[in-house]
């Protein structure tokens, strides 16, 4: 065992052995003290080798409120690669608990600096670190892979480094959403000893299912743009090429799937989900898995709120989303809640957080209609809340009804044209929910099925499932199902949608190509919802095969998936059946 460089051992507030670090040198010396090898009592003892001092780098000089100090450092990982991190320290001497956010996007923009400073003013050191190879972090960009449970455990190393600093109490919490949400699930699996609690927004579990792919639909144009976040852009091109050497879900992708590892996650976490976000499935499934399958400090200690927001929109603390403005009660101050959550878990302050409802969800209703039901938060001891499965069948003539069709030989055909795809709007790279979709629905090759006007309100709360009976003259194609609330004035407000690539209808582990003209069942989850369709409204199901650019078009070919649009791309004719013995339908979670 190497000498400890003259440092004795101390014990932090969580009872773990820590080295007593020499006092930090003055900022004028531009050095942060380094350390060599520290042993932690963890399930997998880890030996750190931090052999070089960290340069204290110049940070933006614009003053921050509350006397908060901003520094940039390079933090060494176990293999010597150094990650760029921005530290925001409160006024005073400390020590303080630490809040960590990990992102590949820039963390030093002025709005980010102000947000970090506000959190730091509440009595935390805030550390905003960039992924390996992103922005000014060293190393090769590999996306999230260096955050996982392989040879590199960058999230683990960041947590343990932060815990060892003289200004740290040794209690670390993590926060953030989307990329920072994924990062937190990866981190939880690795179980750093000083990670105490987490706070996630719009998160995910599997990069194959909820990130680089959606429903098996690949997204090469979207992720080629990730060159822009890389210190060396070529690293991203190599990573994208690597993905396509693994077209199906295999061991490569399992290494970036947290869902099988809930048992390793062992901290309380507050999760925020958003009804108008395709990643809401990841937020909800993360809560369910941690709450019921997590370690002893995880099970029964999770909380979730699901509100009427788009991806990342909860941080705006606004009641407006898309074309809709909800009542003021829809607001949720995420920043205040982050402070409240970590005041309890990292500082031991009794503030009632542990008594908050396990599940809070916003039951959405019609907006602009006084007295409309819904538009308020509800609570539940668990998720999903109990509901009854009610089928809605696609019918000839664009009808949608609870009765199964009885006629024979009834179907509707349309084109899946990758050269002229249906458009959700120029440069729209996120789910276009909470907006009027009627223009999209009037495009060629988009089918709609709509109920009669409702004579009483109907609440759906839970998961919507699509069960389609389809045929195609192509070996592979996509099917998209959308759910909308149609207002009396004709607006069709998009609530939720999802896609399934036909070759993956039997699972993502292998290709299962369609046989020309053969009626084939395809079943998939459309997504989670909590919506009251008001009296006088109609419920609409839209079916199509393209919705670009959010869903990048399928070339309708049996060729292996490729990062470049293939030369054998073709127009497919797809058919939706709505006849006796081959009835397409959705299953709605209806509440009494």
Image (cartoon, rainbow, N blue to C red):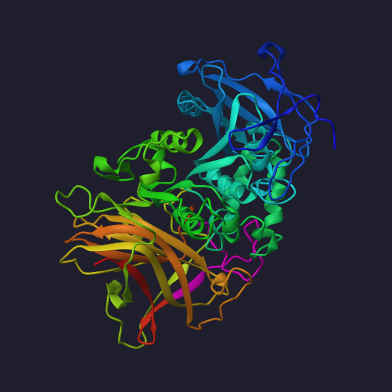
Compared to residue 512, the image places residue 33 above or below, namely above
Identify the residue at image location x=44%, y=58%.
Answer: 422
**Which residues are drawn in magenta?**
551-575
Compared to residue 92, the image places residue 527 above or below, namely below
Q: Position of residue 207 (x, y in %)?
A: 59, 54
Quarter of the image with the C terminus is bottom left
Q: Position of residue 539 (x, y in %)?
A: 27, 64
Q: Position of residue 503 (x, y in %)?
A: 57, 71
Q: Quadrant of residue 89?
A: top right
Q: Does the stretch in magenta take in 578?
A: no
Give the camera-side residue of 7 and 556: 7
Left or right: 487 with respect to 359? left
Left or right: 541 with respect to 229? left
Compared to residue 301, the image places residue 117 above or below, namely above
Q: Position of residue 447 (x, y in %)?
A: 36, 67
Left or right: 338 with respect to 86? left
Whether residue 446 is visible to the viewer of this picture, yes or no, is no
Give the camera-side residue of 331 and 495: 331
């Amino acid at each position: 065992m190497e000498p400890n460089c003259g440092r004795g051992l101390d014990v932090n507030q969580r009872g773990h052995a820590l080295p007593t670090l020499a006092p930090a040198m003055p900022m004028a010396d531009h050095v942060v003290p380094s350390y060599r090898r520290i042993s932690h009592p963890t399930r997998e003892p880890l030996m750190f080798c931090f052999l070089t001092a960290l340069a204290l780098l110049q940070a933006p000089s614009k003053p921050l409120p509350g006397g908060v100090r901003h520094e940039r450092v390079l933090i060494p990982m176990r293999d010597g690669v150094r990650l760029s991190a921005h530290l925001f320290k409160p006024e005073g001497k400390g020590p303080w608990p630490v809040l960590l956010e990990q992102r590949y996007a820039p963390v030093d923009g002025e709005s980010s600096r102000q947000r970090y400073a506000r959190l730091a003013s509440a009595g935390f050191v805030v550390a905003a670190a960039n992924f390996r190879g992103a922005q000014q972090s060293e190393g090769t960009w590999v996306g999230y892979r260096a955050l996982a449970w392989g040879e590199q455990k960058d999230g683990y190393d960041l947590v343990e480094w932060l815990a060892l600093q003289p200004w740290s109490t040794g209690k670390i919490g993590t926060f953030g959403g989307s990329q920072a949400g994924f990062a937190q699930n990866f981190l939880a699996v690795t179980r750093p000893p000083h990670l105490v609690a987490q706070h996630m927004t719009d998160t995910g579990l599997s990069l194959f299912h909820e990130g680089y792919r959606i429903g098996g639909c690949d997204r090469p144009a979207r992720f080629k743009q990730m060159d822009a976040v890389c210190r060396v852009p070529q690293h991203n091109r190599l990573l994208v090429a690597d993905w396509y050497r693994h077209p199906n879900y295999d061991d490569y992708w399992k290494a970036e799937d947290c869902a099988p590892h809930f048992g390793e996650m062992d901290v309380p976490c507050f999760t925020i989900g958003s009804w108008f976000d395709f990643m809401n499935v990841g937020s909800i499934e993360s809560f369910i898995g941690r709450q019921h399958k997590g370690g002893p400090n995880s099970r029964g200690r999770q909380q979730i709120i699901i509100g009427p927001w788009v991806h990342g929109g909860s941080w705006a603390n606004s009641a407006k989303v898309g074309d809709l403005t909800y009542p003021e009660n829809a607001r949720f101050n995420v920043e205040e809640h982050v402070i409240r959550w970590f005041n309890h878990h990292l500082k031991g302050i009794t503030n009632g957080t542990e008594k908050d409802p396990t599940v809070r969800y916003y039951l959405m209703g019609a907006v602009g209609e006084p007295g409309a039901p819904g538009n308020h938060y509800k609570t539940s001891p668990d998720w999903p809340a109990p509901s009854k499965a009610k089928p809605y069948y696609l019918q000839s003539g664009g009808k949608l009804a609870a009765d199964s069709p009885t006629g024979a030989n009834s179907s509707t055909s349309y084109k899946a044209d990758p050269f002229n795809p249906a458009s959700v709007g120029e440069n729209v790279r996120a789910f276009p929910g909470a907006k009027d979709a009627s223009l999209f629905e009037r495009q060629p090759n988009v089918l709609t099925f709509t109920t009669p006007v409702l004579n009483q309100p109907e609440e759906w709360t839970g998961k919507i499932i699509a069960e389609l009976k389809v045929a195609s003259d192509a070996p592979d194609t996509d099917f998209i199902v959308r759910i909308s609330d149609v207002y009396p004035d004709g607006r069709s407000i998009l609530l939720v949608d999802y896609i399934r690539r036909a070759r993956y209808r039997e699972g993502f582990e292998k290709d299962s190509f369609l046989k020309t003209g053969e009626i084939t069942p395809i079943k998939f989850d459309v997504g989670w919802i909590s919506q009251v369709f008001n009296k006088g409204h109609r419920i609409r199901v839209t079916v199509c095969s393209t919705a670009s650019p959010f869903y990048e078009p399928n070339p309708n070919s049996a060729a292996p998936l490729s990062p470049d649009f293939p030369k054998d791309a073709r127009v497919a004719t797809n058919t939706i059946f709505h006849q006796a013995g081959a009835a397409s339908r959705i299953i709605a979670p209806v509440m009494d």
